Image (cartoon, grey):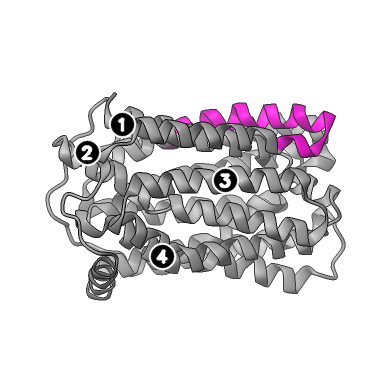
Amino acid sequence: MSATRIYYTFSALIGMGLGATVTVYVPFLLSIGLTLGQVALVNALFWAVIIVSELPTGMLADGRSRAYSLKAGAVFHAIGGLSYLLASGIWGALFSEGLIAIGMAFLSGAQQAWIADALEREGRAGQLRHVFATETIIKAALFIIGGLGGSLLALISYRLIWVPVIVTSLAAVVFGAIKMDGQGEPLERIGEWEAFAKSWQHLRGSRALKWVVGALILFGAVVSFNHFWTPYFQLKVGTLGLSWVWAIIYLTCLPAGLLVRRLPVKTSHEAHHIVLALLLTGLGLLLIPLTGGLLLSIGAVMIHEFGRGLFQPLTDAFVHHRVSSSYRATFGSLQSLFGRVGFAVVPLVVWITIRDAPNTPGTIGTVWIVCGSFLLVGSVFFFLWRIRETPPSLDEAPKDD
């Protein structure tokens, strides 16, 4: 089994379960007693736990085993899903969210590092952006299917959306144990602290990597859409209707992934495309509450999601085109540690500002207007500060797997 197929399968198993939760995640939290402000607080904790856990899990992946880190991440996902299945109230949600966040931290950095080094072993390092874009397409398709399944399960009970998370995460553990051997491990093994020291030194000395970390912090403003799109549209289309809204939203990620796969984006031009992704993401978010009627709002959401579909594979490739094998996972975690600050700060600020506001679409719309404007202004800044350098030669034309 090729490294790319192993990577896609593992990613699909993780994404398949989480996809079942996305359409009714916030309605589930509201059903167990949370307010919109507390939803933001729970997600602020989620990102805070990831930030704290990022570096030690990345160092463990480089120093011990990336396959071990990936399996550990899947285990924590399964335990977190089980905890959510039984959760009640704010404390149950905080505990469950923390478990899933630890699982996400184990996966972050290690997963991308695994495939980056596996491709390098096979002499296909130039196909990295192509692989990340293909992963985006696969996840989009699975999230559409999972979102529909989650909406149907929610008609029986909101709690049932966590059953697929448990099942597919455990399947990922078994698959990882069988298939993920040493092909995605560092080409040169170094200790955890040496990996940290080299990662920190590289980040401090590279303007390009500082630039992309800044872009990731700015991108954290999209988390406001993640939290509130379901209650915003649920009043317009109903619980089951969220499934087709979700399908339209995620179908937009498919052409974004295909575009990244097919366009011969030179590594020296990656920054321009990342700025474009930020611009589209902010524009779409700003327009959702400003447009009149359901169809125009959905159109604005599609612009937002198209930008997001471009952003993830482009930034992943940008980083791994500029980082050495021996500390890829550690650097990926260090980059996420700083880059995900926005994902923790934004919901915390939202909680502080709307904790006494009513649970209405008007409250959500105000949050989106502010966050969308922030993304638009930030994208202009990052365009002016963009990187024009070319990293070591990886400008290989994409090829089909």
Q: Give the range drawn in magenta.
A: 136-161
Proximity of marks 2 and 3: CB atoms separated by less than 8 Å: no
Tell me the element at label 3. Answer: helix
Residue under label 3, please give it.
77
Q: In which quarter of the image is the C terminus?
A: top left
| Number of other residues with Cα within 10 Å of mark 1, as a class: few under 14, some 14 to 19, many 20 or more | some
Return the x and y of residue 28 as percentages of the image width and height. 78, 45
Of residues 182 and 314, the one nearer the viewer is 182
Q: Which of 306 and 337 is in front in this view?
A: 337
Residue position marked by numbered label 4 in the rendering: 56
Which numbered circle lies on residue 119?
A: 2
Q: Name the residue under label 1.
A: 4
User: If you read the primary sequence from the N terminus, does the residue marked by circle 2 or circle 3 appear first?
Assistant: 3
- Please indicate whether residue 182 sits to the left or right of residue 288 in the image: left
Looking at the picture, how far across and down is residue 4, in whole percent?
A: 31, 31
| Distance of label 1 from label 3 (alpha carbons) | 23 Å
Q: Earlier in the sequence, mark 4 or mark 2?
A: 4
Find out whether residue 154 is within the magenta segment: yes
Picture residue at 28% right of the left edge, 73% below the top: 200
Dividing the picture into quarters, in which one does residue 245 lie? top right
In the picture, measured across the screen, residue 28 lies left or right of residue 214, that is: right
Q: Main secondary structure of the magenta part?
A: helix
The residue depicted at 43 percent of the width and 53 percent of the height is 108
Asked if the residue at tag 1 contacts the one at tag 2, i.e. Cβ–Cβ closer than 8 Å, the answer is yes
Say few, some or many: other residues with alpha carbon within 10 Å of mark 2 (under 14 / 14 to 19 / 20 or more): many
**Residue 231 visible at all:** no
